[in-house]
Image (cartoon, rainbow, N blue to C red):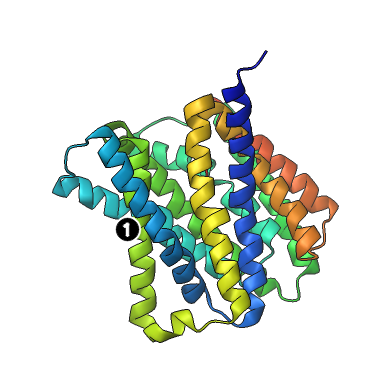
Amino acid sequence: MNHPGDRLGLLFAVLGAVGFSFKAILIKLAYPYGVDAVTLLALRMGLSLPFFLALGFADGRRRQHAKLSGRDLALMAGLGFTGYYMASYLDFLGLQYISAALERLILFAYPTLVVVFSALFLGKPITRRALACIGLCYAGIALAVAHDLHIAGSARDVWIGGGLVFGSAVSYALYLMGNGQAVVRLGAARVTAWASAIACVLCLGHFAATRPLGLLLVQPAPVMGLAVAMALFSTVLPVWMVSEAIRRLGAGPVSLIGTLGPVVTLFLGWLILAEPIGLFQILGGALVVSGVVLVGRKGPRSSRA
């Protein structure tokens, strides 16, 4: 019989995957009210900032960490920039152009990018098996793009949006390469809390540098409600639940459960946004998920926020 903690860990892993997947739906629901990507991202991260600060201070008190050195702070700033600020910004921009389902499939290819970057920058060879898995992923993305090109009003929008979201996946893959080294030295909770907090500050700084500050809090009520939901249910709670699931189950099983993400987004996009589902999209999703599962078997991946 499974330990109750295993069942709770499984529940947290599933809810975390659903929460992260729901982010794209909330973004798409907000855009018709006229809010732009920079403002919406600033709202999401500004509302999340107090929770990440609380997580960082609570972890510091519990574990009595040594103070972060200047090198550690620079590393956290780099991780916050690539993994949460730049990746999120490009993702939010991309969702102005493409469907939520296509966005999630493109983003979900980030483990294959980690394999490629590890070969380019760290000298780790790419095996034939990994190449086959990468081929599966990108064949799946090609099918999903073909589906969106068929139904989209403008092929240009699909290519622009797809390119922006792929840039988000590249940024997140670079973050993961640095994150692994930071977590070994500093701990997962500490890295997540402070890198996320730095990203929140960067997002708010981006808004302050490009828009009047007063504009942030005079958004339509539906936009504010969606931003609160995004911060709570698609940022803070999933980050905590996935971390807790990893503590209870291990990174491997949680990473595997995270493959629910594209399927959940595909279903929610159809149910809530009335995005059409076609055979190419279903087949493409199956290929992407299969490729990621196979490429990740020898090394668990972090969950995508």
Give the farthest residue toward the right. 279
Query: Percent from the top left, x then y, of residue 110?
Result: 52, 46
Up the image or down, 198 lies above or below 182; here it is below
**Residue 133: in sight, yes or no?**
no
Look at the image and tell me in which quarter the N terminus lies. top right
Query: Percent from the top left, x then y, of residue 184?
Result: 31, 31
**Disc 1 target residue:** 198
Disc tally is 1
Query: Percent from the top left, x then y, of residue 162?
Result: 60, 62
Is 274 situated left or right of 285 in this image?
Answer: right
Query: Percent from the top left, x then y, of residue 283?
Result: 78, 45
Q: Residue at x 28, y 55 (%)?
A: 77
Front-lying residue, 214 or 261 = 214
Corner quadrant of residue 100: bottom right
Is 177 situated left or right of 284 in this image?
Answer: left
Corner quadrant of residue 181: top left
* Element assignment for label 1: helix
User: Badge 1, how many Cα within 10 Å: few under 14, some, many 20+?
Assistant: many
Front-lying residue, 160 or 16 = 16
Front-lying residue, 46 or 287 = 46
Corner quadrant of residue 176: top left
**Residue 218: in sight, yes or no?**
yes
Q: Residue at x 38, y 62 (%)?
A: 200
**Mark 1 is on which residue type?**
Ile
Q: Residue at x 57, y 54 (%)?
A: 233
